[in-house]
Image (cartoon, coloured by chain):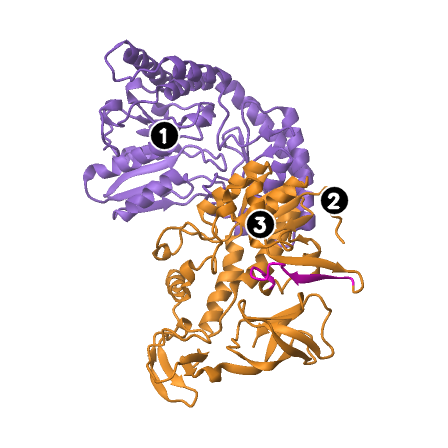
Amino acid sequence: MPDSTSSAPIAVAMSGGVDSSTVAAMLARDGRAVIGLTMQLWNQRRLPELAGDGASGRCCSLDDVYDARRVAERIGIPYYVVNFERQFEEQVVKPFVDEYLAGRTPIPCTLCNNYIKFDRFLEMADSVGAGQIATGHYARIQYDRRTGRYQLLRGVDQSKDQTYFLFGLTQPQLARTLFPLGGLNKPQVRELASSLGLEVAEKPDSQEICFVPNGDYAAFLSAYMKETGVEPARTEGEIVTADGRSLGRHAGVHHFTVGQRRGLGVATGEPLYVIATDPESQRVVVGGNDALLRGSFFARDVNWVSIAGASEPVAATVKIRNKHAAAPARLLPTGDEARVEVVFEQPQRAVTPGQAAVFYSGDVVLGGGWIE
Amino acid sequence: MQRFYFDHNATTPVAPEVLDTLAECAGQVYGNASSIHHFGQMAKQRLEAARRQVARLIGAHPAEIVFTSGGTEADNLAILGTAHLAGTPGHVITTAIEHPAVLGACEALEREGYEVTRVPVSAAGVADPDDVRRALRPSTRLISAMHANNELGTLQPVAAIAAVARDAGVPLHVDGVQALGKVPVDVNELGVDLYSMSGHKLYAPKGVGALYVRKGTRLAPIAFGGHHERDRRPGTENVPGIAAFGRAAELAGARLAADGERLAQLRDRLEAAVLGRVEGTGVNGARDGRVPNTSNLYFDAVDGEAMVIALDLRGFAVSTGSACSSGAVTPSHVLTAIGLGADRARSSLRFSLGHDNTEEQVDALVEAIEASVAHLRRISVHA
């Protein structure tokens, strides 16, 4: 266990929002030495055509840096902005774009956690002499003496739980990380922020993916490809049914994600959903709701968190989207420790390649991987 | 914690003598220098006294000094004000290592249809006057080159570039912000037509600067609304700031020689100690022909941004290059221009000394550098 009374400073990742601001303020209140660091991840001056109503309320805006700096000033801690734009572009944005163009629906937040927040940031914390890092994530970490492993648990506030995006954390990362908000719910955090005198106490929650304004992936992808000179060879294609019947044409597979219903531009008697996208043939396959159901899938690049692995079948609940209620399933070993077959008790809707599948036992995160 | 300041190229503290002038003026000389009455006349007197003081520091005539809000405005006035005279887009020559105030003004001209040539610099960080000559076109309206580089401290061959400009009949603007107060400046010996200055780089407060405009040099205004500064820069004059700038110019002239010698010794002491005690380090740019206070060093396998923070937490203020709006860092265009790869550019730090630094402070800085580099190299896997 890390020594919680250590005098080494804690580096707090401060976004300027209420959660991370509260973390910094409560650690400082408890007498811990705190260094505030804001990660500059994305230059909001890029892709100006997406700016719309201005750069406020989105990640890494000057307003957010201003808010974080104000909090640091109020609680009297050293504060710095560190620039990770280069790493963020390489390890989060580009893979996000590549995945989308390959017909999968990626989750940049997980990549950001794996490669930026709990890797590059941890290294920066080391650089400035901090022994541990703390973030405003809604999740809990506990040490299991029996197995000698750090366990990751859902945040107490189930509606805010962020473990779906944290399944990639390694044991060394968990050993040095604090999630001080894991035992609180959001209203309590806001109350705490208010009682600590933080002006951000009532600041609205951030939404969606930080570098994609208004959650409009297609507009982001178009603007990004234009800026970087990446032109997909062909963008438009056919909309077909599972049995190959053509229903019309579409403007590009990256406009579609599995399970999507609206925006297909084809009219039939029954509601149609995207069942699959195939970037090879540029086809979007559609069908009825039942066609979306799948009973099993394989997960690749599995990271085991609270258990060392699954050499025997493991009973779990499995979450295949952030807003998905984890469904009962069995995890079947494949001989490859980093690949499992997930077999649901009941078929699940819209099992989407590229999304994460996270395995739970109650509140405990067993591990997770990527849907093949 | 005791804190030591080694970032004088970013800005300097206001000298006590200058602060006296500033406080006295701000408190008592509140008239508008354009007013007819006694209060206005008192302000006008201070304004003109400061103009004489600044003119004296660079060997100019007082009527050739236009006060501005700082170096950035002086650069913009010089570049836009000269380029716009002809009324149609033309060509401008500058260098690859200019301050953003110059590069930004040039980019604004490009958006208007002007063409801009940015001549490269050598690994030493010095532009070649022959490159400037070769870049000349019949449509060239202006040459703009800095006197001393803000990141490396390297001095540019201003007199030779001025000869090129004179032969071609093209006006020469020199951004002198980082040279003023550090090396002797004589605008006639240099042969420049326009010379930008900033108060806060020589122990005056922020928000005041000046542009030297050689008599007979035409300049279109870039702001409108008054007849101040001989129709060149409208707006009620910042008399307390300008008076403080004048006092600082006088002070700089008086202590230039002694400070220059002392700071060069301190700088050499810093470099000798760091290069002798820390492996994988070196000086970026030429070691000869620099302003005396500036040292730009690389520390291989060290992230410069992390090092700035680590040193700050130990009480030492240094920088990775020019200060940036959000406080974050992108690889320096200056270090890139002298041929440094991205890794070495990101592992570089600028140390800029000033009047109040002592040998003891430099020695303490060396200790902190040694400890920080050792720590960062121990833990770093990326840098």
| Amino acid tagged 1 | Ser
Residue topped by disc 2: A6
- Could you say which quadrant of the image residue B381 lies in? bottom right
Residue topped by disc 3: A189
Residue B284 left/right relative to A254: right
Q: Earlier in the sequence, mark 2 or mark 3?
A: 2
Residue B106 versus residue A53 in the image, above or below:
above
Q: Quadrant of the N terminus of chain B?
A: top right
Asked if the magenta segment contains residue A154, the reply would be yes
Whether labels 1 and 3 belong to a single chain: the reply is no
Disc 2 to disc 3, how far (Cα)? 25 Å
Task: Please state the extent of the stretch shown in magenta in the rendering.
Answer: A148-163
Q: Are marks 2 and 3 in contact (CB under 8 Å)?
A: no
Image spot of residue A199 (x, y percent) = 50, 41
Q: In this structure image, what is the colour of chain B? A: purple
Query: Which residue appears farthest toward the top when viewing the image?
Result: B38
Q: Residues within 10 Å of mark 2 (few under 14, many from 20)?
A: few
Nearer the observer: mark 2 or 3; the answer is: 3
**Going 42% across and 13% down the picture, which residue do you hit?**
B24
Asked if the magenta segment contains residue A67, the reply would be no
Query: Which residue is more in the foreground, A314 or B282?
Result: A314
Disc 1 to disc 3, how far (Cα)? 52 Å
Q: Residues within 10 Å of mark 1 (few under 14, many from 20)?
A: many
- Name the subunit of mark 3: A
Q: Which mark is drawn over residue A61?
A: none
Residue A287 versus residue A86 in the image, above or below:
below
Nearer the observer: mark 1 or 3; the answer is: 3
Residue topped by disc 1: B196
Q: In this structure image, what is the colour of chain A? A: orange
**Going 49% across and 37% down the picture, which residue do you hit?**
B151
- Name the subunit of mark 1: B
- Could you say which quadrant of the image residue B36 lies in? top left
